Image (cartoon, helix red, strand yellow):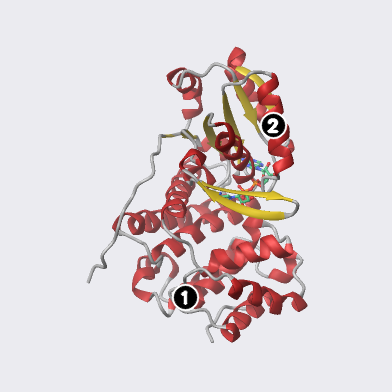
Amino acid sequence: MLSAFTYQSLPAHIIFGAGSLAQLNTELERLNCSRALVLCTPQQHQTAQAIVQQLGTRCIGLFDQATMHTPVEITEQALQVYAQHQADCVISFGGGSTIGLGKAIAYRINTTHIALPTTYAGSEATPILGQTENKQKTTIRHPRILPDVVIYDPQLSLHLPVELSVTSGLNAIAHAVEALYAQDRNPISSAMATQGAQALLQALPTLLREPQQLEARSQALVGAWLCGTVLGTVGMSLHHKLCHTLGGSFQLPHAETHAVLLPHALAYNAIAAAEQLQPLENVLGPNLAVGLYELSQSLGAPMALKDLGLQESDLDRAVQLTLQTPYWSPRPLEANALRALLQQAWAGSVPHTT
Ligand code: NAD
């Protein structure tokens, strides 16, 4: 029987399609903005120049210091540049790190934020900001954090390296997997999660063979939007808790950690959520965890936490930290079973459930 649910949608203004970047200037006009500060990482400085050129006199500068985990010092530097040049909006061009910086600025000074995503992490679709100060990561959820406009142009991800495309895609699929068994799921979130995961699961093998195939890039990007949207609307579970613990306390890299852990978290929860996860069987086969593990392997994804720098001696502490402030999980969290899950993920062995 269908469970009772409450549904609240987030406002979203999405412009999707190959070449849709051309609409950026019109969007600025529509939003009454004429002095944009463009944001990017140092690595994307060169490609961001094309955005600067397209904006012409509507651009007052490029701030290229966006970095992982949105350090508060960097946000303050960007705010100074914003104020010095009397900007009236920010345009974030990049992955979750750059979009995080755009969100941090918009949250503080309530300015207009247009996001141009170039990975599949999905941050642009959520009202959530994770930021760090004195090595402490905190998370804020606020309507002002959600970007005002997202332009999804698959041409912007055409040159996303294959390894990053795979880990970022698996990061997005993780949002969908956990949305399918979320406690506060509803028919819309489940439909979006199913379609988002299926789109990415189908696009990634094509991107491995043909990284610049525009059709597969489009499919992956629409999947990323759907997966990001459910990340912003329903609660995440064990998998995200483990990733936040390993990222926050052991400095493991974001997308790679998601990629390694997902088959193992899926194995843990599949027993308790078989019916909700059933829509993924047509792409992953009847044993979802093993199906995903084999797919990740075939895509060349990282498979073991030990290869990401985690020590075996850290595993007990990771379990303790996970259990100190647990997230709701369809299968209750149990110390021995979690320890076994982490041991398998650490070694990179085939997931199985204890
Ligand atoms: P990222 O933004 O850190 O990018 C990784 C690297 O890839 C960077 O060097 C970047 O410059 C480069 N890159 C990005 N797009 C590229 C492209 N098209 N071509 C070539 N290089 C490219 O990685 P990410 O995985 O997108 O984001 C991770 C961060 O986002 C983490 O800090 C995570 O916590 C955050 N995040 C937040 C949310 C949220 O809702 N708040 C959701 C997902 C991720």
- Viewer-side label of 1, 2: 2
The image shows residue 247 at horizontal and vertical percentages of 67, 61
Mark 1 sits on what residue? Answer: 269
Q: How many neighbours does mark 2 have within 10 angstroms: few (below 14), some (14-19), or many (20 or more)?
A: many
Residue 288 image offset from top left, x and y in percent: 46, 72
**Residue type for callout 2:** Ala
Q: Which residue is mark 2?
A: 78
Mark earlier in primary sequence (1, 2): 2
Q: Residue 70, located in which quarter of the rendered image?
A: top right
Considering only vertical position in the picture, is 223 above or below 244? above
Q: Secondary structure at mark 2?
A: helix
* Residue 54 can be seen in this image: yes
Residue 66 picture quarter: top right
Indicate the secondary structure of the residue bearing disc 1: helix
Amino acid at dot 1: Asn
Q: Residue at x 48, y 47 (%)?
A: 126
Are circles 1 and 2 on residues that touch, CB within 8 Å? no
- Residue 1 higher or lower than 137, as above or below: below
Residue farthest along the left direction in this orientation: 1
For this view, does 273 lie left or right of residue 37?
left
Q: Is residue 149 left or right of residue 211?
A: left
Q: CA distance from mark 1 to mark 2?
A: 41 Å
When asked about the image quadrant of residue 47, the answer is: top right
Q: Is mark 1 within 8 Å of ligand 1?
A: no
Find the residue positioned furthest to the top: 57
